[in-house]
Image (cartoon, rainbow, N blue to C red):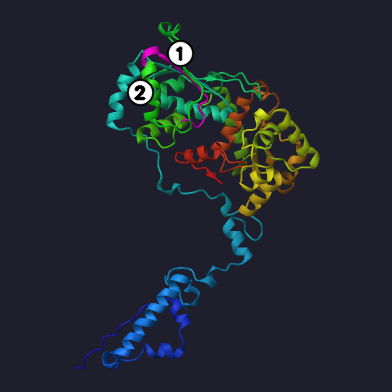
Amino acid sequence: MAKSKKVSYISVPSQIINSLSSSSLQSLLVSPKKSSRSSSKFFSFLFKNPRLWFLAFFLFGFIAMLKMGFNLEPLIPFSPNPCGITQSQGIVSAGSLSSHLGVKEDGEKSEFWEQPDGLGYRPCLEFSKEYKKTSLEIVEDRTKYLMVVVSGGMNQQRNQIVDAVVIARILGAALVVPILQVNVIWGDESEFSDIFDMEHFKRVLANDVRIVSSLPSTHLMSRPVEEKRTPLHVSPQWIRARYLKRLRREGVLLLRGLDSRLSKDLPSDLQKLRCKVAFHALRFSQPILELGNKLAERMRSKGPYLALHLRMEKDVWVRTGCLPGLSSQYDEIINNERKRRPELLTARSNMTYHERKLAGLCPLNALEVTRLLKALGAPKSARIYWAGGQPFGGEEALLPLTREFPNFYNKEDLALPGELEPFSKKASFMAAIDYIVCEKSDVFMPSHGETWAMQFRDIGLMQVTRSI
């Protein structure tokens, strides 16, 4: 009985096949026995000739040095990684690039509205046993109270309230409901309970920090320890060393201007508390929630929508040291205002406008936002909600956007007659309504580096919103 031959197969990547000539392919079919005989003769020949060994080592070393000094990959006929994309494969047509960005060749929307998969992240507010053990002692303490005055716009105030709760926890003190400082630009005199649901705030944090509406009678006559200028990014250890001894002696600590004062690098339990405050405890008051949700539903009624947070108000151009770029007359108005009120300039005063622009410190104007959206593949039919105050220059400032994207709305466009009237004089209320509609959008894009984008990214752990 004849023995059946064993057939061996070699799996070769297609890149290698394409790079080999027909003679090279023919050589692969040589009998293994013949191949082994010829290779054994070759190695015996090498062993008998030391000069050839020296030459081989020299060539090997020379090629290695070249490899370190130059990129030789283009000289290699196939990719080092058979699964990688070769240079020829990397060249794509304009149509396929548009498809990748989310616009099909016929201009219809496709991948632009696709949502991220969350990258495996999930909400996690499980506190450690040590944190839970010390919570009972902290919430029962009646000797130490922290008062805070928060400033800035609605979003800056929101961030400072979050840090105030964490600082109260670090000090083991009760937190008096934060005082909202009247904004010098908008003149908004809203209180905490006007914007946020105070009872919900107290209830959610009941096991973390005791929240009180006002100082108790036992501490009304106390002279609070006041700190106006806390350094930036301080640690929990710094806070305890700086304030705890005086707080125990006086009973009341008053802090002002907490923006970016607390470190972002906190122990796990304190970071979880920060998230708990921001995304669970700080809920807008019922009137704001109801109207914000109504406007979001009206935007949603015809499909997905994109939210833009435009920072093109007059005070923004003044504060950032930038120019709107509408015309020389508008730029002159901003420059004169900045000279008249130098205290409003919050950007680096030693930088020129062009230096700020190149450093990415200026808000994008409408033309720049339009170019960016088109480059990202936003379809012309995209429904866009724009948040923010009245842009400097009025409708003229928005023309590049409205020409390219006609489905362009803000809260005034979506609200029914009289719906916004109760909030019209209160900038914080209007900002909160914008915040809700932006949070519920499918895609969010800010025109200036800010915390809204970071917050919506973190909210994405609980509900999907893509920030770009």
Going by the image, does 8 lie left or right of 403?
A: left
* Nearest to N terminus: mark 1 or mark 2: 2
Q: What are the residue bounds of the magenta stretch?
A: 248-261
Please state which amino acid type lies under the numbered disc 1: Pro
Q: Is residue 4 above or below residue 156?
A: below
Dot 1 lies on which element? loop
Q: Is residue 255 magenta?
A: yes
* Corner quadrant of residue 340: top right
Residue bearing mark 2: 207
Report if residue 294 is visible in the image: yes
The residue labelled by disc 1 is: 224
Instruction: Identify the residue at horizontal 56%, vertical 33% (top origin).
Output: 436
Residue 12 position, x and y percent, is: 39, 78
- Residue 303 makes an appearance in the image: no
Label 2 amino acid?
Asn
Given residues 319 and 150, the one toward you in this image is 319
Task: Report the front residue among 405 and 392.
Answer: 392
x and y percentages locating residue 142 in the rendered image: 36, 13
Residue visible at 43% across and 49% down in the picture: 119
Residue 292 appears at what percent x and percent y?
A: 59, 30
